[in-house]
Image (spheres, rainbow, N blue to C red):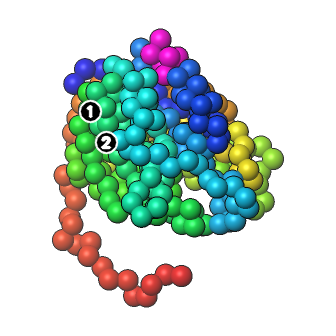
Amino acid sequence: MSTVRMAAVAAGFGRDLDEDFRVVARLVDRARADGVRLLALPEACLGGYLLSLDGDAGQDTGPPPLALDGPEIRRLAALAGEMTVIVGYCEAGGDDRRYNSVVCVSGDGVLGNHRKVHQPLGEDASYASGDGFHAFDTPVGRIGMMICYDKAFPESARALALDGAEIGVCVSAWPGARTQPAADLAQDRWKRRFDLFDRARALENQMVWLSANQSGTFGSLRFVASAKVVDPGGEILADTGVTAGLATAELDVARALETARRAMGHLRDRRPETYAVEPVAAPA
């Protein structure tokens, strides 16, 4: 695999789908001009996220549900062209269900799709849950995707790594703390958790990690931005901080993985036969 220039985005998106596409197009053009081949945009790019995580959105009907094989995703693929682009959206499922999903596209069409499995707080009032994690091949390497709260569970990224993912991509609409928020978002405890999860998931699986996130505010939520690229040793190569922007880095993915796993291979040295433990009691 050759060296790949990749970028993760921190940006804001709302209910106006046409405006969202204009923002996506500008970001894709900016990344293309910089030689980026893999671009990750946040959760809920197309139609915006929820106004609140309390399960009470008032009169808001939520983001528009889009079909995976519909015109909006085809439009997204056309914008991507020769690039590999990852974008969060609200997916229309059967029986009027909606999924919080992320799609990976190129000019050839859909390369992969993931439905968010883990739902925080009141999100399950708006979305059905996905049921698994799977990696897939792309022109820039084998990728595994997840959405926001998914990364709080080590099993999510581990499942992708065991499925051969070389690059993990987590798209988020991760806000600052709901209670006792920090005046300086850079010091917010939920922002620190966001960063810790990114570094831990990269390091424990010795994989390249892209983390995209919403920025600004939407409804009652104030997002921490902090898009970043992390290497397989858990070191941050690029980071937007708490503002909008593109975190861009270039590395030889295959060499980075080989170097990280040469001596202490976390996937190679697993002892899965020792991990089966039944919980004493279901946690609250």
Q: Mainly helix, strand or loop, the magenta region?
A: helix
Badge 2 density bin: few <14, some 14–19, many ≥20, Cα 10 Å: some
Q: What residue type is labelled 1?
A: Thr
- Residue contact between numbered discs 2 and 1, judged by CB atoms under 8 Å: yes
Residue 229 showing in the rendered view:
no
Q: Name the residue under label 1.
A: 138
- State the SS at label 2: strand
Badge 1 density bin: few <14, some 14–19, many ≥20, Cα 10 Å: some
Q: Measured along the vertical axis of the image, is residue 263 above or below residue 98?
A: above
Q: What residue type is labelled 2?
A: Gly
Residue 28 showing in the rendered view:
yes
Residue toward you, 51 or 68: 68
- Residue 158 image-quadrant placement: bottom left
Q: In which quarter of the image is the C terminus?
A: bottom right
**Magenta-span inclusion, residue 68:** no
- State the SS at label 1: strand
Asked whether, in this view, residue 206 is left or right of residue 245, the answer is left
Q: Which mark is residue 181?
A: none
| Segment colored magenta | 28-34
Q: Going by the picture, which residue comes out furthest to the bottom?
A: 281
Q: Is label 2 or label 1 in front?
A: 2
Marks 2 and 1, how far apart in space?
9 Å
Q: Measured along the vertical axis of the image, is residue 125 above or below residue 238?
A: below
Q: Residue at x 69, y 55 (%)?
A: 60
User: Which percent across, then down, holds residue 144?
Assistant: 32, 45
Q: Mark 2 points at which residue?
A: 112
Asked whether, in this view, residue 6 is left or right of residue 196, the answer is left
Q: Residue at x 37, y 37 (%)?
A: 104
Q: Going by the picture, which residue comes out furthest to the right?
A: 183
Q: In which quarter of the image is the N terminus?
A: top left
Q: Residue at x 21, y 66 (%)?
A: 272
User: Which percent across, then down, holds residue 4?
Assistant: 33, 22
